[in-house]
Image: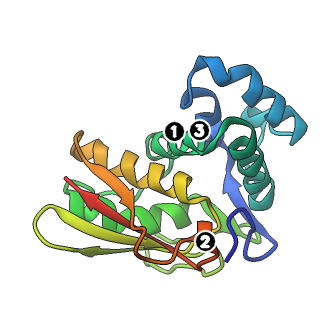
Amino acid sequence: MAQYVAFRPGIEVLAPNLQSFFEAPGRSYTPMIMKIMIKHGLHQLISIDWLPMQLWLDTQREMATTLGEHALFALGKKTPELAVWPSGIDTMETALASVDAAYHLNHRLDGEVMFDVRTGAMKEGIGHYRYRADGDRRAVVVSDTPYSSEFDRGILTGTARRLKPAAEVSLDQTQPTRRRGGDSCTFLVRW
């Protein structure tokens, strides 16, 4: 699966989360970010509730090309602070295990949010973040989303550092990655 390509039409992203565009990479990027946002019609996020996922992916692709993937990592790190999350997250394990639910809570398909916190029902169509423990203070998260590897690494880093500020997340280069045409990326989380 290619980075920056939505899996299907009708998927939307919760627009207030995109405020990270302004806050994450730093003030020196603000003029370039604004130029990219205006080009993609995202300069009035305050008045928008949801926007097409593909538009957000196109904007991220241009940011990666213009500013570098480190900007997407910075955006991803800020995202957990702005996104809607399930309740009851008080350990690293519950935080990492809840990334998939949070991801689905912040996307909708044909006008319906993709995760129901009441029933636990999850709609398919945007991929997943699959968590598994991997020993003492280690975990593996496999992501098969259309977002970039660096954006995903940023999301996982931001999530982990909310509970453990020294946590580190790395892309497992021994596994397939979307950067190299794979269907998923595998991330190693240590805290």
The numbered mark, 1 or 2, whose residue comes first in the sequence reads: 1
Q: Residues within 10 Å of mark 3 (few under 14, many from 20)?
A: many
Amino acid at dot 3: Ala
The residue that disc 1 covers is 74
Quarter of the N terminus within the rendering: bottom right
- Front in this rendered view, residue 127 or 1: 1
Q: Amino acid at mark 1?
A: Ala
The residue indicated by pointer 3 is 71
The x and y percentages for residue 106 are: 58, 58
Residue 46 picture location, percent across and down: 72, 33
Task: Identify the mark nearer the N-term, 2 or 3.
Answer: 3
Q: Which residue is under mark 2? A: 180
CA distance for labels 1 and 3: 5 Å
CB within 8 Å, label 2 to label 3: no
Determine the secondary structure under disc 1.
helix
What is the number of callouts on the image?
3
Kindly give the residue lying farthest to the left in the view shown: 136
Residue contact at pointers 1 and 3, CB within 8 angstroms: yes
Q: Is residue 49 visible?
A: no
Left or right: 74, with 19 as reference point = left
